[in-house]
Amino acid sequence: MVSFVLLTGCGVTQSPSATVGPAGPAGAPGLIFLNAYTATLQYVPTDVVTYQGSSYVALATSTGVAPVGATASATDWAVLAQAGATGAPGAVGAVGAAGPQGIPGLSGAQGPAGSPGTAGAQGAVGVAGAQGVQGPVGPIGLTLQSSYLPNQQYAARDVVLYQGSSYVALAANMGVAPLGAAMSGVNWAVLAQAGATGATGLQGPAGLTGAMGPQGPQGAAGPQGMMGLPGATGAMGPQGLMGLQGSTGAMGAIGQQGTPGVAGAQGTQGPAGAAGAQGSQGVAGSQGPTGATGATGPAGPSGTSAVSYLQNRKLGVQGDSFSALFNNAWQNVVTSRTGMTLAVQEAHPGKRFDTAFECWSNPAVGGMLGPFTASHNLSGTGGTCAQATFGISDGTLFADSLANVDLEVIELGTNDQSTTLGQLGDATNSGTYYGNMRWVVENYLNAKPTLRVVMVTLQFNNFASAATNQQYADATVAYGNSIGIPVINMFKLGGVNAISSPVLLRDGAHPSDFAFANFYGPVIAQQLQTLF
C-alpha cells in the first residue's frame, strides 16, 4: 500500500508596518496522481500511477508504455515509491457471520423443439432498395503482354511469359530478359513459376501420312565463307597388300581341219613360230606348312606430335548476355574442342562497349580504369560486379587480372546498335561505336602487350534490321583490320538469318540450346583453331 501525505501551508499574519517582499520564483510543477496505470491513457511528465504495488512518475509523454515489462523504458518512467516486501501472515481471523441467501441457480436446459408449424403465405415483394454508394476504385491490374520480346518496351505491371514461367515488370525496361531474379531483380519478379515436367504420356496411334507439300522455292545462295588456311600435309600411309591374281580367260574354239594340200618341195627352215597361248591353270596344291616367324625388327624412331597453340592456354571472356547467361554454353564448346581453360570472365546482360569497364571503379568512357569494385551495382541488371564475374577479386588492378590470361575473347556489339557509329580513328572519349571499341581494346593491349585479343561481332538479331546488324558487324571487322587483331564475323558465319532465326533464336536475339551447341560455339572454336 502506498500512502500520500498532503502538506498545507501555514498562515503568517502580516504586521501592519511590514513591507511586502517581491514574489518568489514559481515552484516546480506538482505531481498529479492518476490512480492505477491504464494502457490506453496518454501520460505526460509529473503524472503519477501505481503499477504492481509500486508508484511511478512519468518522465515523458507516452501511451501504452508500461512502467515495467517488455515495453518499459528508463526515459518514460521513474520509480517514486517501491512496493514494500510482503509482510508476515496475520493471525487467523474469527469466523464471520453466515452470508446472505445465495442467488437462484441457472435455468434448466432448453427442452426439445416442437414440430414445425405450417408454412405461412408468401409475403408481398418488398420495395427495391436505393442505389448503393459507388465503391472505391480498385488497385491497378496487371497487363498481359504475351511472350517476352527483347525489342519491346515494357511498363511497370506488364506481364510476360518467358521459358515456361510468367513475370511481372517492376519498372519500365527494354531488352532486359526476365531471368528468374539473378540478373534482373529490379526489373522483373516471378509471377508464376513453371511447373515441373509431367510424366511422359502414352504413345498415341500413328497419324495418317499427309500429302506431300509442293516444292518450296530455292533459297538464296548464302555468302561465300572465308577460305581456311591450308592444312599440313599428312604422313604417307603404309603400303597396301597385293591384290589376288585374276583368273585366266577361257580358251577359244579350235578351227575346222583344212583339206590336205599337195606336198610341196622341202622349203628352207622358217623362222620360229610365235609361242602358243598359255594353258589353263592347274588345280592348286594343298597348303604347305607355315614357316617359322622371323625375328622382330628394331623399332623405328617416334614421329613428332603436332600440338595446337591453344592446348592448355588460359581463356578470358569479356561479353554480354550471350556469355553471361545459358550456363557458359558457347564457352564450354570452345574449351572442350581447343583444350583451353576458362580462367577469367567478365560478362553481364545489357553490356555495351561503353559500359564494359564499369566494374573498374566506373570510369567515364575514355578514362583511366581503377581497382575492381565487387560491390558496384551494374547498370540495367540489378546485379553486382561480384555476381557477373569470376577469377577477379575485389581491389584487383586491371593489369593484374590478366596475369593468368593468354587469349581474350571480346564478345560485344548486340546492345550497341543504338550508339552513333562514327568512323575509324574516332577518339576513345568520342562516345561513338568506333571510339568505344578503341577504348576497350587499347586498355587490354596496354595492360598486357603479349595478350592475344580476338573480337567476336554480333550475329543476326531482331534488336534492329538486318542492314543495321551488318553495318555494326562490318564496323567491328574494319576496326580489327585497322589495328591488326583477328575478328570472327558471326553475322556472316553464325548461320542465323531471317529464315532460320525462328528456329535458331530463342527470343529473337539469343541462340537456342541447339544453336549454341551446333552453330555459335563450334564456329568460334573452329575460327580460333584456324587463327592459332
Image (cartoon, rainbow, N blue to C red):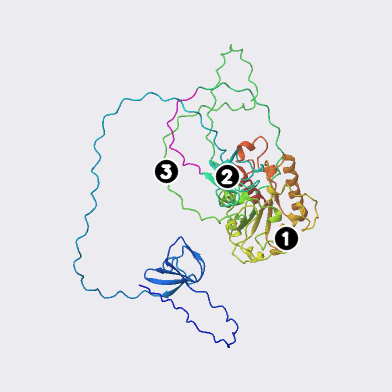
Give the percent coordinates (x, y) of residue 394.
60, 65
Q: Residue at x 49, y 24 (%)?
A: 207
The image's mark for residue 168 is 2
Q: Quadrant of residue 70?
A: bottom left
Which residue type does callout 1 highlight? Ala
Give the x, y percent position of residue 497: 67, 38
Whichever of callouts 1 and 2 sits on the residue coming sooner in the sequence is 2
Residue 290: give its label.
3
Q: Amino acid at mark 2?
A: Val
- Residue 346 versus residue 494 in the image, above or below: below
- Report whether 413 appears left or right of 158: right
Give the distance between the C-alpha atoms of the residues marked 1 and 2, in whole angstroms. 33 Å
Q: For the residues labelled 1 and 2, say whether their Cβ atoms are less than 8 Å apart.
A: no
Mark 3 / mark 1, whichever is N-terminal: 3
Q: Which residues are magenta?
A: 193-207
Say which mark, if any, is on residue 151.
Answer: none
What residue would you read off at disc 1?
364
How packed mark 3 is, by other alpha carbons closer than 10 Å (few <14, some 14-19, many 20 or more), is: few
The correct choice, above or below, for 403 with respect to 232 in the image is below
Q: Nearer the viewer, mark 3 or mark 1?
A: 1
Which residue extends farthest top? 259
Residue at image position (64%, 17%) is: 265
Circles 2 and 3, Cβ within 8 Å, touching? The answer is: no
Question: Which residue sits at x=55%, y=17%?
Answer: 254
